[in-house]
C-alpha cells in the first residue's frame, strides 16, 4: 500500500494504474502526498477508501494534486466519512449544502479568521472529525496552508506539564473570533445560537487512542476547572497561573518540528484529521484572489 517515494508503487491493483496509490511522506511528523489516485473514484470504491482512511490516520493530512473533480464528487468523497456541516458565518455553495466557500478577494471583508492557528469549529460541542479542502483559484504566489501535529505536540510536552494538565478542561467560543467584528446584537445572537462549549485539554483520538493537546489560540478562552486549591493559594495566582499555562499550551502549535506547509495549485486537495491537527492559512497574497471550498465532516464529542 505504501512505498518509499523513490521506488515504484508497492500496490498496483489488477485493473489499472488508477487504482494504485503512491505515498510520499512530506515531513518526519505530519503530512503525505498521495498520487495515482482520483478522489471521485475513491468515493465509489470501498477498497481505495479503506486505504485512504488508513493513510489519513497515519499522516493526519493527505495532499492530492490535479483533482479536477466536480463539486458533487468533492461532496461525495467527504460524505463517505460522515455528515457535512455548514458554517454559520462563512457561506456554503447554494447548490451544495456543506460545501463552504472560503473565497478571498480584494472585496472580502477585512476580517480574516483563517490566519491564526486553530482546529476547525472547536466552538461546537462536536467539532468536525476532518475536512476536505479544494483549491478552486490560487494566487500566483503565497496563500500556503500550514498544519501541525497536536498528538506530537502533546507527546513532547515536559512530563510535569502533562501531569498538570491531565483532567483540565477548557472553554471554547465562537464569540471572540467570528463574532468579534459584529455589532453587539448580532454577536450575542451568534453566541446564543452557538453557546460556548467545553472540551478536555487533552483529548483521546476516537480512532487511534492517542492523546492530543486540544487547545487553540483562536477559540479556547480559559480553563474551566483550574482555580482549585491545588493550583491557587491566593486570588492573585488565578490570572497569571491559568493564563500563562494556557498561553504556553497554545504556543506549542507554532513549533516547526511538528508542522508541514503546503503550496496550493488549482485542484489541489488537502484532507486533514481535525481531531489531531491545527492549521494556519498564510495571508500573504492580497490583493490576489484565493478561492477554496471546504467540506467539514461532523465529528464526535471529544473525550
Ligand atoms: C480553514 O481554516 O479551514 C481553511 C484553511 C485554508 O483556507 O487554507
Image: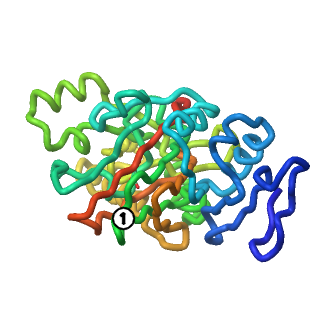
Q: Residue under circle 1? A: 143
Q: Is residue 131 visible?
A: yes
Image coloring type: rainbow
Q: Is residue 241 visible?
A: no
Q: Position of residue 79 (x, y in %)?
A: 58, 31
Tell which of 253 and 168 is nearer to you: 253
Q: Quadrant of the N terminus?
A: bottom right
Tell which of 162 and 139 is nearer to you: 139
- The residue under the point 77% across, 35% down is 46
In the rendered view, would you say 278 is above or below 274?
A: below
Q: Quadrant of the C terminus?
A: top right
In the rendered view, would you say 63 is above or below 301?
A: below
- The residue under the point 57% across, 59% down is 65
Mark 1 residue CB less than 8 A from any atom of ligand 1 = yes
Q: Position of residue 187 (x, y in %)?
A: 16, 32
Q: Position of residue 19 (x, y in %)?
A: 79, 50
Q: Is residue 193 left or right of residue 280?
A: left
Q: Position of residue 202 (x, y in %)?
A: 53, 46
In the rendered view, would you say 226 is above or below 250?
A: above
In the rendered view, would you say 150 is above or below 127?
A: below
- The residue under the point 31% across, 27% down is 194
Q: Is residue 8 left or right of residue 55?
A: right
The quadrant holding residue 196 is top left
Residue lying farthest to the right in this orientation: 14
Amino acid at each position: 500500500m505504501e512505498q518509499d517515494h523513490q521506488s515504484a508503487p508497492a500496490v498496483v491493483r489488477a485493473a489499472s494504474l488508477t487504482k494504485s496509490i503512491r505515498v510520499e511522506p512530506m515531513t518526519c511528523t505530519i503530512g503525505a502526498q498521495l498520487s495515482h489516485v482520483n478522489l471521485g473514484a475513491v468515493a465509489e470504491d470501498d477498497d481505495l477508501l479503506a486505504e485512504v482512511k488508513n493513510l489519513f490516520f497515519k499522516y493526519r493530512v493527505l495532499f492530492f494534486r490535479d483533482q479536477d473533480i466536480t463539486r458533487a464528487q468533492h461532496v461525495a468523497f467527504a460524505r463517505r466519512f460522515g455528515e457535512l456541516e455548514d458554517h454559520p458565518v462563512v457561506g456554503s455553495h447554494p447548490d451544495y449544502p456543506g460545501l463552504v466557500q472560503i473565497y478571498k478577494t480584494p472585496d472580502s471583508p477585512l476580517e480574516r479568521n483563517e490566519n491564526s492557528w486553530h482546529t476547525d469549529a472547536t466552538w461546537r460541542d462536536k467539532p468536525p472529525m476532518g475536512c476536505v479542502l479544494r483549491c478552486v483559484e490560487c494566487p500566483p504566489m503565497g496563500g500556503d496552508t500550514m498544519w501541525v501535529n497536536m498528538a506530537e505536540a502533546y507527546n513532547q510536552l515536559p512530563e510535569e506539564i502533562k501531569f498538570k494538565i491531565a483532567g483540565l478542561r477548557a472553554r471554547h467560543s465562537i464569540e471572540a473570533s467570528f463574532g468579534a467584528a459584529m455589532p453587539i446584537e448580532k454577536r450575542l445572537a451568534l453566541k446564543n445560537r452557538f453557546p460556548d462549549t467545553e472540551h478536555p485539554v487533552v483529548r483521546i483520538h476516537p480512532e487511534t487512542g492517542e492523546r492530543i493537546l486540544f487547545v487553540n489560540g483562536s477559540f479556547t478562552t480559559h480553563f474551566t476547572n483550574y482555580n482549585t486549591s491545588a493550583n491557587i493559594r491566593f486570588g492573585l495566582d488565578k490570572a497569571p497561573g491559568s493564563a500563562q499555562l494556557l498561553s504556553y499550551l497554545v504556543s506549542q502549535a507554532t513549533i516547526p518540528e511538528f508542522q508541514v506547509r503546503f503550496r496550493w495549485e488549482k485542484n489541489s486537495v488537502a484532507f486533514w484529521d481535525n481531531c489531531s491537527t491545527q492549521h494556519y492559512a498564510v495571508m500573504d497574497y492580497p490583493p490576489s484572489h484565493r478561492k477554496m471550498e471546504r467540506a467539514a465532516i461532523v465529528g464526535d464529542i471529544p473525550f
